[in-house]
Image (spheres, rainbow, N blue to C red):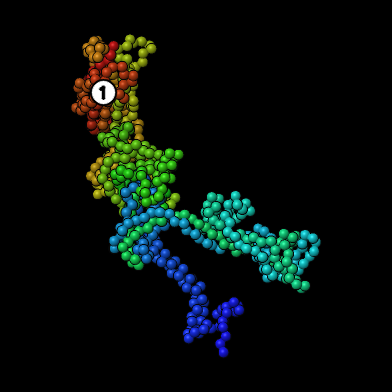
Amino acid sequence: MMSMFDPLDDPCPFSKPPIGEHGTAVSLLLLLLVACLPVLSSSLATAAESAENAALLELQTERVIVFKDGYCLIVKRGAATTDDRGEIHLTTVPDAAVLGSFWATPREGRMIGMVAGWVDVTQREAKSLPCLETIEVLKANVGKSCSVDLRDGVPLSGVIQAVLTQETPVPISDAVRPSFEPLAGHLSSMRTIPANASAELAHSRLHAISGTHFVLRTTDGDVLIPAGDVKRLTVRDMQTTLARTVTTTERTKRLTFRFAEAGQRRELMIAYFRPGVRWIPTYRIQLPEGDGPQKMAEISLQAELINEAEDLIDTPIDIVVGVPNFRFRTIPSPLVLEQTLRDALQQAAPQLSGQFRNDLSNALFTQRAGEFRAPQPDVAAEPAGIALPPELTAAATQELFVYNLPKFRLRKGERAAIPIYNTPAPYQDVYTWDVLVKRSDIATAPSGSSAGSPLTLSSNEVWRQIQLTNTGTMPWTTGAALIMQGGQPLAQELLTYTSPKGSVRVPVTVAIDVRGSMNTEEVDRQLQALTWDGHHYAKIRQRVTLEVTSFKSQPIALEIGFRFGGRAEQASDDGKITLAPYREDDWNQYRGSPAVNNSSTVRWSLSLEPGKIFQPTVDYHFYARH
């Protein structure tokens, strides 16, 4: 006879089969389902985690192209499997990509778009941490024999049977748990908690143990003892650390790439332009010892690399001569999610926001003796963390040329020096004397002991320079050059950009055995020779005699450049005259109109024999207001 089944009368509802034709089968099925629920839940979680990992795009840096102005183009490649939404994602979002330069290109398949955003990632990690309270020491030694001295003086002995506690996640911060401050150094070794910020610890939670009593099993029975009453605890081989769970929640960037198909393997190439990596060219110019029939120098180029961007692991590096035109180079891409931060930084500390933008480029050699090239427009240097001389921080227009380097390992914050090439180059010594005369506008003032000379010679130094010819197929970019002869350093100067088949001059030192001097005499003076803007001007004619003497044992190539305020009329010894408009730096305290005076330059090129004197003259006039 079958009895009615009442679940209220049976502590185990599944211990008896239900009524029905298929009662036994249903009962077994229900039992099987209940038993499999944890396994199914775990399997589903594992499958979701596997799908998440499969959709994670891990990029490898394929190539880095480095420019001299502190910017670089980074090319990366990676592959992942799209999830059920057709998405793959990237967590290492570049933090400094320039506007318009961030591009993702799939090898196959159609990419619908990219989405940049933030996600909260929770990580749990078990760590063995020191016990800081009595209840924690008791929990760490459950099952061990001990002796306990209580505050009322009663000693007890037995086995720690159980510790009545519960775990509660609490923030690890000074405001919540000052007692956890000694753990900061220990927790900093964990991957999830940075070592240098209590603010970061505030985003982490430690599973704290809270409880007041424990059970001590004695020969007379189990005793419930308040942990606060323990005055002394004695345990052989006492365990003083306890396994604790630390949960860290971080808000991280995520870049999601959406495709039309789900469950497909997709390979992406990502390229972006960013600041933080630069190269500085340095040269060594080795001159031969002695005088041969044809002088050949050995030029060695070395690239000094500075990486303040990201780790480069076994990455081919290309270094570029020249600077590309990126109009929006100072504007970050919206995809890096840093615009607000950068705007604030620009206003609060502009010197920091531009610290990687010190423009090292191919400047021209100006304002020095023996200037060889006509100046071109340049771009002012910007603030940088690395101080460089102004000659190395001005940009000049030129085409790009790439030096390909092999795979290299350079982590963020590291520097490296890489040899590029050695090449021979024919050279010759050239001696140059550039004379700039600055005139004080007191030529019509009364002479006397209080009146100084109206002429000031800016320099009376004859420079030795070497003129190098680039006979190779690669250009020489602007860089610091150390000039050596034998084992003796002669000078350190600037070698400027030189195209193949071109020539460049590099100053070496002031020649001590080639001397120059200048003498000026007045030839004629006409008062009120010109009236301009209601003022009278005197026309003063003068003759300048330059004298250069060589004490060398060999003939030298000599070039003289003489510049002054006024109009050159004639020059001896085939001097070439060039007239230009008024220049302010030809005068001191000029009182007249710029329209009445020219700026004149006279040049001579010759071979000066040993012991000979070269004495060219220049006749000229200028106008002085009186």
How far from the left and from the top, in percent, is residue 92?
A: 41, 56
Q: Residue at x 38, y 56 (%)?
A: 255
Confirm whether residue 582 shows in the render. yes
The amino acid pointed to by label 1 is Tyr
Q: Residue at x 79, y 65 (%)?
A: 155
Q: Is residue 194 left or right of residue 273?
A: right
Q: Residue at x 32, y 49 (%)?
A: 100
> Mark 1, residues whose alpha carbon is within 10 Å: few (<14), some, or many (≥20)?
many
How far from the left and from the top, in percent, is residue 218?
A: 75, 71
- Judge by depth and name the residue closer to the eye, 423 or 120: 120
Asked if residue 192 is positioned above or below residue 552 in the image, the reply reads below
- Judge by depth and name the residue closer to the eye, 317 or 229: 229
Q: Is residue 181 left or right of residue 541?
A: right
Confirm whether residue 286 shows in the render. no
| Quarter of the rendering containing residue 44 | bottom left
Asked if residue 237 is positioned above or below residue 364 in the image, the reply reads below
- Judge by depth and name the residue closer to the eye, 57 or 452: 57
Q: Callout 1: helix, strand or loop?
A: loop
Q: Residue at x 28, y 14 (%)?
A: 625
* Furthest-bottom residue in this view: 1
**Which quarter shows the C terminus?**
top left
**Which quarter shows the N terminus?**
bottom right
| Quarter of the rendering containing residue 410 | bottom left
* Furthest-right residue in this view: 153
Residue topped by disc 1: 582
How far from the left and from the top, in percent, is residue 73?
A: 33, 51
| Quarter of the rendering containing residue 265 | bottom left
How far from the left and from the top, in percent, is residue 108?
A: 28, 63
Label total for image? 1
